[in-house]
Image: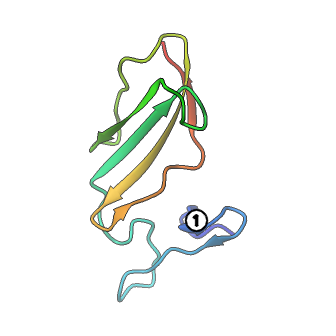
Amino acid sequence: FIPHHDVPCAGTYEVPKECPTLYGSDTPCTDGGEEIYEFEVEFNERDDFLGSDGGRKIVTASLTSLEHLTSGRPYYIRVLARNSIGSGHFTSQHLSVVAP
């Protein structure tokens, strides 16, 4: 069973744990109750993110573009969110794209 919002806050997809609730609320929340103010986007040519052709970018919008990628090379991309409580974990499932 994945929590009501379809995102396990702790544990794994196989054994998820429900997110904490705000004081006085009964609805769990994945952001700890604080607004997300930035995202960190990491990209790399290797799926373990240890390759030499990659980097990180801090963004405040939900859309961004990555520049200076090698044309025709596949890249893996993952994202984490950050708020006043701290940083989340990088997404465990990452996107693979080929640079134009």
Residue at image point 64% right, 67% down: 2
Residue positioned 40% across, 40% down in the render: 41
Q: How many labels does the image show?
A: 1
Question: Hey, which quadrant is residue 46 in on the image?
Answer: top right
Q: Nearest the camera: 60 or 49?
A: 49
Q: Looking at numbered disc 1 in the image, what kind of residue is underneath it?
A: Pro
SS for dot 1: loop
Residue 89 located left or right of residue 47? left
| Rendered position, 68 above or below 26 | above
Q: Which residue bears the numbered disc 1?
A: 8
* Residue under the image location 54 percent in, 35 percent down: 50
Left or right, 13 with respect to 45, comes to right
Quick check: 87 above or below 90? below
Residue depicted at x 39% and y 53%: 81
| Whole-percent x, y for residue 82 in the image | 34, 56
Identify whether 1 is placed above or below 87: below
Q: Where is residue 55 in the image (x, y as percent from the top left)?
A: 40, 32
Residue in the foreground of this view, choosing between 66 and 63: 66
Say which quarter of the image contains residue 8: bottom right
Find the residue positioned furthest to the bottom.
24
List x then y, in percent, for residue 6.
Answer: 58, 62
Residue farthest right in this picture: 14
Q: Position of residue 31 (x, y in %)?
A: 39, 65
Tell which of 75 and 16 is nearer to you: 75
Colour pattern: rainbow
Q: Quarter of the image containing the N terminus?
A: bottom right
Q: Quadrant of residue 37?
A: bottom left
Determine crowd level at label 1: few under 14, some 14-19, many 20+ residues with C-alpha closer than 10 A: some
